[in-house]
Amino acid sequence: MTYIYDNQNIFAKILRGEIPNDTVLETDHALAFRDINAQRPLHVLVIPKGSYVSFDHFAKEASGIEIIGFTRAIGKVCDILGVSIDAGDGFRMIANSGEHGVQEVPHLHVHILGGSSAGRMIQS
Ligand code: 5GP
């Protein structure tokens, strides 16, 4: 099986600068921006700059440099938001993937949610 990446998805457009975003961090390998429909006081999406549909796609096909760059960017975003557990109150990280993961945008993104308790992991 191969992963099929739709380069017209909304996050691809954000990466190309075709749609504005509220940037929290940009690095060589990642972009982090505030979710347009925040579910918690702090709600940031972190995406790799490469064309990966989902976390499993990224985990299997991204280079080591991309994986390190994306992972380090997540760590930096946690520091910027003040949610790192060494200095703040923590966060929830979510990577919805595919149909059963109820993924809306088919470009890998992790949600970083903080600023209040995220509640139980799954409600229904
Ligand atoms: P998913 O359900 O795919 O895990 O989450 C997609 C997220 O992208 C949703 O939380 C939604 O609010 C957010 N989103 C969708 N379109 C835009 C947009 O144009 N800009 C921003 N900043 N967030 C978006």
Image (cartoon, rainbow, N blue to C red):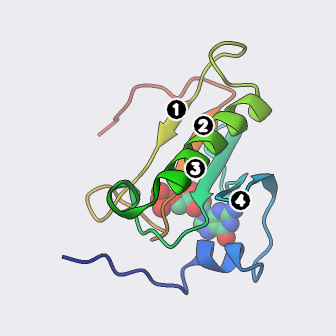
Label 2 near label 4: C-beta < 8 Å? no
Label 1 near label 3: C-beta < 8 Å? no
Q: Is residue 24 above or below residue 12?
A: above
The residue singled out by tag 2 in the image is 113
Label 3 vs 1, first from the N-terminus:
3
Label 2 vs 3, first from the N-terminus:
3
Q: CA distance from mark 4 to mark 3?
A: 9 Å
Task: Name the front one of labels 3 and 1.
Answer: 3
Residue flagged by tag 4: what amino acid is it?
Asp
Please give the label number shown on residue 28. Answer: 4
Q: Please, what secondary structure does the residue beneath circle 3 have? A: helix
Q: Is mark 4 within 8 Å of ligand 1?
A: no
Q: Please, what secondary structure does the residue beneath circle 2 have? A: strand
- How many marks on residues? 4
Q: CA distance from mark 3 to mark 1?
A: 17 Å
Outermost residue to the left: 1
Q: Quadrant of the C terminus?
A: top left
Q: CA distance from mark 2 to mark 3?
A: 17 Å
Q: Please, what secondary structure does the residue beneath circle 4 have? A: loop
Please give the label number shown on residue 92. Answer: 1
Residue at image point 35% right, 59% down: 102
Q: Nearer the viewer, residue 114 or 18?
A: 18
Q: CA distance from mark 1 to mark 4?
A: 24 Å
Residue at image point 67% right, 47% down: 44
Q: Where is residue 105 shown, x and y percent of the image?
A: 49, 69
Label 3 near label 4: C-beta < 8 Å? no
The residue singled out by tag 3 in the image is 70
Label 3 near label 2: C-beta < 8 Å? no
Label 1 vs 4, first from the N-terminus:
4
